[in-house]
Image (tube, grey):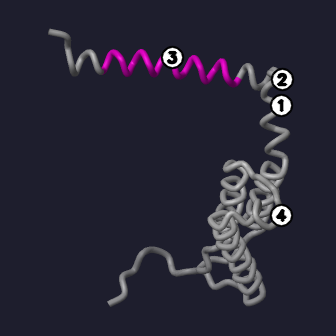
């Protein structure tokens, strides 16, 4: 017996669903190819390029986000789904390609990085004090 889980799926247009299915298949194939290439260390063996782990993870994130916006086939894709998927893939691709330069810029201490790290440090300091207080309450000294 089929269980009803909400509103019935909206039928997608044939052309739109074929395009979404094709893009989803391409993104899935790229994701699998990237993982296999990373596991087999193909970037350094074949191309002689040493990549940061963060570069690989950024590519995986971009492909995964693209899939998240396009993979659902029970509803038609809207322009914002295509835009979000494109922006995610392009932005993560940009970060992956520029990651060495972006990570080197951190040593120059740009203003936005200093403000962000100061805020992060303050949050961590507050959390450390809360953690220590919680531990002292649970395990009081005898």
Task: Give the distance between the C-alpha atoms of the residues marked 4 and 1, in whole angstroms.
Answer: 26 Å
The reply to whether discs 3 and 2 touch (Cβ–Cβ < 8 Å) is no
Q: Nearer the viewer, mark 3 or mark 1?
A: 1
Q: Which residue is mark 2?
A: 108
Mark 1 burial class by Cα count in 10 Å: few <14, some 14-19, many 20+ = few
The single residue placed furthest to the top in the displayed view is 142
| Mark 4 surroundings: few (<14), some (14-19) or many (≥20) residues within 10 A | few
| Left or right of residue 24: residue 135 | left
Occupied quadrant, residue 68: bottom right
- Report if the CB atoms under discs 1 and 2 are less than 8 Å apart: yes
In percent of the image, x 81 and y 20: which residue is there? 111
In this view of the protein, which residue sits in the foreground, 19 or 139? 139
Mark before the other along the chain sequence, 4 or 3: 4
Q: Is residue 8 left or right of residue 134?
A: right
Q: x, y (%) of residue 101? A: 85, 39
**Would residue 107 be found to the left or right of residue 32 on screen?**
right
Q: Which mark is residue 105?
A: 1
The residue tagged 4 is 47
| Spatial CA span between label 3 and label 2 | 24 Å
Where is residue 63? Give x, y as percent: 70, 64
Label 4, label 2: how far apart the Cα atoms are: 30 Å
Graded by Cα atoms within 10 Å as few (under 14), some (14 to 19) or many (20 or more), the crowding at tag 3 reads: few
* Bounds of the magenta segment: 116-134
Question: How far from the left and from the top, in percent, is residue 44?
Answer: 76, 60
Looking at the image, is mark 4 or mark 1 nearer the viewer?
4
Which residue has dot 3 on it? 125
Q: How many marks?
A: 4
Kindly state the secondary structure of the residue where label 2 is placed: helix
In the foreground, 26 or 3 = 26
Q: Could you say which quadrant of the image residue 75 lies in?
A: bottom right
Of the 4 image quadrants, the one containing the C terminus is top left
């Amino acid at each position: 017996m089929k269980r009803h889980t909400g509103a019935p799926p909206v039928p997608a247009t044939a052309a739109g669903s074929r395009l979404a299915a094709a893009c989803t298949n391409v993104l899935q194939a790229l994701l699998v190819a990237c993982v296999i290439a990373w596991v087999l260390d193909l970037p350094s063996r074949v191309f002689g390029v040493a990549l940061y782990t963060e570069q690989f993870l950024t590519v995986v994130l971009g492909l995964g986000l693209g899939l998240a916006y396009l993979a659902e086939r029970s509803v038609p894709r809207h322009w914002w789904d295509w835009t979000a998927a494109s922006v995610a893939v392009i932005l993560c691709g940009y970060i992956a390609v520029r990651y060495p330069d972006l990570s080197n810029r951190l040593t120059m201490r740009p203003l936005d990085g200093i403000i962000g790290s100061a805020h992060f440090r303050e949050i961590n300091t507050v959390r450390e004090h809360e953690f220590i207080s919680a531990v002292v309450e649970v395990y009081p000294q005898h």
